[in-house]
Amino acid sequence: MRRCIWMLIYGIGLYLFWGIVLLFSPEAMGITVMGIFQQNNVSHYVVSMLFLGAGLLTFISLFLKNTLATVLLCFPQQFLLMINAASCLLCIFAGKYADGVVRPVSFILADQFPFVFAGVIHSVVLIDMAINNYLDV
């Protein structure tokens, strides 16, 4: 579990931070990873609650001793990471950010790749945890 925990902590910090920011500032919906939510007119309060909930569930999962329960509690965060990664990919291929700013594809790719990569690595961590039963004694 020790080698996996840092990716989970990254996701926890990211979603708790974004959730708090969105709770108090609807302007944050303009960032690239929020593009899908913004285009579908999802309220910043709803997105904030989703992010805070996913972060808290994953945080709780760190204290469980059962691998299956831990992996299941991490799924909401995983789902949101994949939605955010898809939003970034859409912006990369469109050549413009979610707020409409046009940039070269290579620029947006370099800027947004960490979020896409985080979604992939988080997936690998959950699969690795499930296969190797890190927490089951």
Image (cartoon, helix red, strand yellow):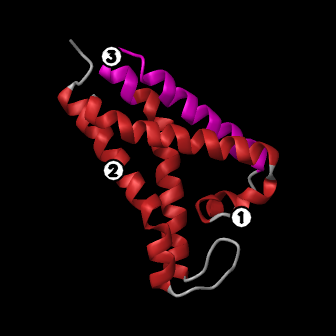
Disc 2 marks a residue whose amino acid type is Ile
Residue lying at 72% horizontally and 47% vertically, measured from the top left: 21
Q: Position of residue 2 (x, y in %)?
A: 28, 30
Tell me the tag on residue 95.
none
In magenta, the rendered stretch is 43-71
Which circle's residue, 3 or 1, is located before the other in the chain?
Answer: 1
Residue in the picture at 55% in, 45% down: 14
Q: Which mark is residue 121?
A: 2
**Amino acid at circle 1:** Gly
- Element class at badge 2: helix
Queried whether the magenta region covers residue 3, the answer comes back as no
Q: Position of residue 61 (x, y in %)?
A: 44, 23
Between the residue at mark 1 and the residue at mark 2, the CA separation in whole angstroms equals 25 Å
Whether label 1 touches label 2, CB < 8 Å: no
Comparing 107 with 127, the one in front is 107
Front position among marks 3 and 2: 2
Q: Position of residue 30 (x, y in %)?
A: 71, 64
Q: Amino acid at mark 3?
A: Asn
Quadrant for the C terminus in the image: top left
**Residues packed near mark 2 inside 10 Å, few (<14), some (14 to 19) or many (20 plus):** some
Q: Secondary structure at mark 3?
A: loop
Cα distance, mark 3 to mark 2? 21 Å
Q: Main secondary structure of the magenta part?
A: helix
Q: Splitting the image into 4 quarters, where does residue 100 fall?
A: bottom right
* Rendered location of residue 45, percent (x, y): 77, 43
Location of mark 3 (residue): 66
Determine whether 64 is above or below 50 in the image: above
On the image, which quarter does residue 68 sit in?
top left
- Tag on residue 30? 1
